[in-house]
């Protein structure tokens, strides 16, 4: 069994950020019928060195043996446990515009440990309308409903101008992790984790590497 994280050894966020991609790749290998993999094979599929794979995993314990590689099923279970997605997290989605609708209609969250519980919007024309299997709720009821349901994870798909105000409501409701699709930075209290997803920024990062 893997060891617990050694005391006093902080885990870099960049390492945590790679774990979901390791998990996704392992699930693909399992779907191909493979039972054993190696750090070299994982590295080839992810564009990383085998040394990087081994170093990242070493933060969480010893998962393989020299010359034998990793048992794929076992490593999947361990990574799900480490990422705390060996359970289902209820999620609140705020924003029922084009992006929010795409998110609500995406069916890949459940297999990764997440399930949308509520969808909120501030537009009276959208409130009480159906969106996928959800009924859009009035954002005025967000704090009460999210707090009562003890939801700790949110996805924010609202315009940049509204993002901070909605973030404040989510924090007031007890949300501790926000996936922010709005192209703006959020100010949140200590203990609240924000992950920013800005497609425009990622596109700009890519074009840096293109020849003019």
Image (tube, grey):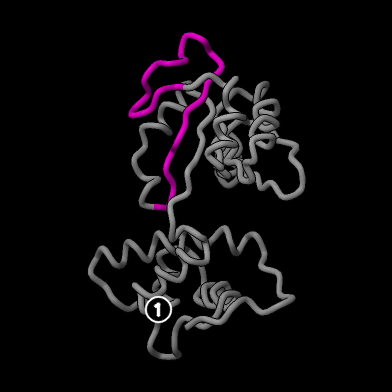
> Which stretch appears magenta?
112-136
Where is mark 1, residue-wise?
A: 38
Asked whether the viewer can see residue 212, the reply is no
In the image: residue 42, left or right of residue 194:
left
| The image quarter in which residue 164 lies | top right
Lateral position of residue 135 relative to residue 84, left or right:
left
Quarter where residue 157 is shown: top right
The answer to whether residue 55 is above or below residue 186 is below
Q: Residue at x 56, y 82 (%)?
A: 3
Residue nearest the viewer, comparing 167 with 205: 167
- Residue 47 is left or right of residue 14, and the answer is left
In the depicted structure, whether residue 137 falls above or below residue 171? above
Q: Mark 1: which secondary structure?
A: loop
Mark 1 packing: few (<14 Cα in 10 Å), some, or many (20+)? many
The C terminus, quarter of image: top right
41 relative to 17 in the view: left or right? left
């Amino acid at each position: 069994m893997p060891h617990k994280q050694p005391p006093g050894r902080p885990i870099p966020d960049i390492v945590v950020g790679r774990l979901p991609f390791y998990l996704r790749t392992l699930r693909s290998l399992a779907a191909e019928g493979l039972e054993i993999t190696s750090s070299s094979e994982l590295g080839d599929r992810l564009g990383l060195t085998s040394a990087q794979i081994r170093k990242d995993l070493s933060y969480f314990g010893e998962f393989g043996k020299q010359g034998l590689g990793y048992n794929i099923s076992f490593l999947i279970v361990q990574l799900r446990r480490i990422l705390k997605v060996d359970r289902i997290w209820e999620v609140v989605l705020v924003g029922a515009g084009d992006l929010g609708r795409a998110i609500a209609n995406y069916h890949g969250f459940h297999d990764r440990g997440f399930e949308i519980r509520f969808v909120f919007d501030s537009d009276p024309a959208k409130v009480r309308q159906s969106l996928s299997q959800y009924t859009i709720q009035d954002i005025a009821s967000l704090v009460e409903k999210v707090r009562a349901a003890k939801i700790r994870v949110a996805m924010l798909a609202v315009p940049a101008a509204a993002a901070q105000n909605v973030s404040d409501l989510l924090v007031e409701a007890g949300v501790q992790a926000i996936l922010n699709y709005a192209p703006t930075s959020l100010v949140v209290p200590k203990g609240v984790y924000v992950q920013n997803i800005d497609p425009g920024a990622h596109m700009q990062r890519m074009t840096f590497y293109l020849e003019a």
